[in-house]
Image (cartoon, rainbow, N blue to C red):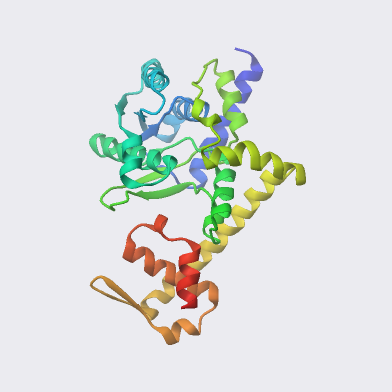
């Protein structure tokens, strides 16, 4: 292997190690579940974690779900992940679920259905093997695309944060939860591909990433290139916006937690907010406290959009 390839690998490994420590994503002696699809991002994640697992003092276990959406291609992905895990000496759990049937039942988007079914599977495996948390291969590019998706759909400041280094995922019925971490969030998709090349490994290619029927793909292939024609540094600009939004939300969360006991009264399945005290607050705090109340009642923040908050405040 050339010195340049070794440098690429070492550089990325050190960056991911620093990111994990900076955001306190893992503790020593933990067993970490790693979601691996077979694509460049998740393969890069697995290889890096194998390289730094001793330094972190953790154990790894791979999980792969066959979504049964691409026929033989999906089956080949599962075989690839099984062989890759065996080659790296990492135990693996592989299963298949009917995502299309779940989408029809829940009447949601295909992307939402795939995420719900996949994370439910990860949560099951994590529970079975005693792992916590689960790592996924989301990159800075996914982060940027998520910010734009939220913006297009009409999200508030919270949505502009995009993806976070760690998130507590909850199933739609609130019966299952899983801590999800994203060690590659400061790494670009181009860098994961370069790492795989330096590692002399050929990841799988997902043909569904080319389909313009999915909003994320249209943002990736159409909207982002258009925005770059207006601002060549649009990716950096969106990342900065997400960082600022995350800081603002963190401050609001801190302030609302101090006010909660003074303003909110929880009774059985109801939360009563003191209207006089709410009226005296800054609109930003009003929004945040109202969202907190709605989230506690619904148990699922994904069901609450900015329009719901604004509509309730205007009532």
Q: Quadrant of residue 290?
A: bottom left
Q: Quadrant of residue 8?
A: top right
Tell which of 64 and 11 is nearer to you: 64
Number of marks in the image? 0
Q: As displayed, is residue 96 above or below residue 5?
A: below
**Is 216 on the left or on the right of 63, as rendered?**
right
Q: As displayed, is residue 192 above or below residue 120?
A: above
Position in image of residue 82 (x %, y %): 36, 19
Look at 72% across and 42% down and name the residue there. Answer: 228
Which residue of the protein is positioned furthest toward the bottom in this rendering? 276
Position in image of residue 44 (x %, y %): 51, 27
Tell which of 276 and 29 is nearer to you: 276
Q: Is residue 215 visible?
A: yes
Look at 59% across and 45% down and name the residue there. Answer: 144
**Is 96 on the left or on the right of 223, as rendered?**
left
The quarter of the rendered structure image containing the N terminus is top right
Q: Is residue 31 visible?
A: no
Look at 37% across and 20% down and name the residue there. Answer: 75
**Is 39 on the left or on the right of 85, as rendered?**
right
Position in image of residue 129 (x %, y %): 25, 34
Position in image of residue 55 (x %, y %): 45, 32
């Amino acid at each position: 292997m050339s010195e340049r390839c070794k440098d690429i690998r070492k550089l990325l490994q050190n960056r991911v190690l620093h990111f994990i420590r900076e955001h306190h994503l893992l503790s020593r002696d933990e067993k970490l579940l790693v979601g691996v699809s077979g694509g460049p991002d998740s393969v890069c994640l697995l290889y890096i974690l194998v390289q730094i697992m001793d330094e972190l003092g953790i154990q790894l276990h791979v999980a792969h779900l066959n979504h049964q959406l691409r026929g033989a291609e999906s089956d080949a992905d599962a075989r690839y992940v099984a062989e890759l895990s065996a080659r790296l000496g990492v135990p693996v759990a592989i299963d298949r679920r009917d995502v299309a049937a779940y989408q029809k039942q829940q009447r949601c988007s295909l992307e939402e259905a795939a995420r719900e079914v996949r994370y439910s599977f990860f949560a099951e495996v994590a529970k079975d093997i005693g792992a916590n948390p689960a790592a996924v291969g989301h990159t800075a590019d996914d982060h940027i695309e998520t910010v734009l998706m939220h913006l297009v759909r009409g999200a508030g400041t919270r949505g502009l944060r995009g993806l976070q280094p760690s998130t507590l995922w909850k199933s739609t019925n609130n019966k299952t939860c899983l801590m999800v971490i994203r060690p590659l969030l400061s790494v670009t998709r181009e860098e994961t591909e370069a790492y795989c090349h330096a590692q002399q490994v050929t990841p799988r290619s997902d043909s569904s990433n080319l389909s313009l029927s999915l909003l994320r793909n249209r943002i990736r292939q159409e909207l982002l290139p258009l925005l770059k024609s207006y601002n060549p540094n649009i990716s950096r600009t969106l990342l900065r916006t997400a960082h600022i939004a995350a800081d603002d939300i963190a401050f609001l969360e801190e302030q609302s937690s101090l006010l909660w006991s003074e303003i909110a009264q929880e009774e059985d399945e109801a939360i009563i907010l003191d209207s006089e005290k709410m009226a005296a607050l800054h609109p930003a705090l009003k929004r945040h406290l109202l969202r907190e109340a709605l989230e506690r009642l619904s148990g699922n923040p994904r069901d609450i959009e900015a329009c719901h908050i604004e509509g309730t405040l205007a009532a």
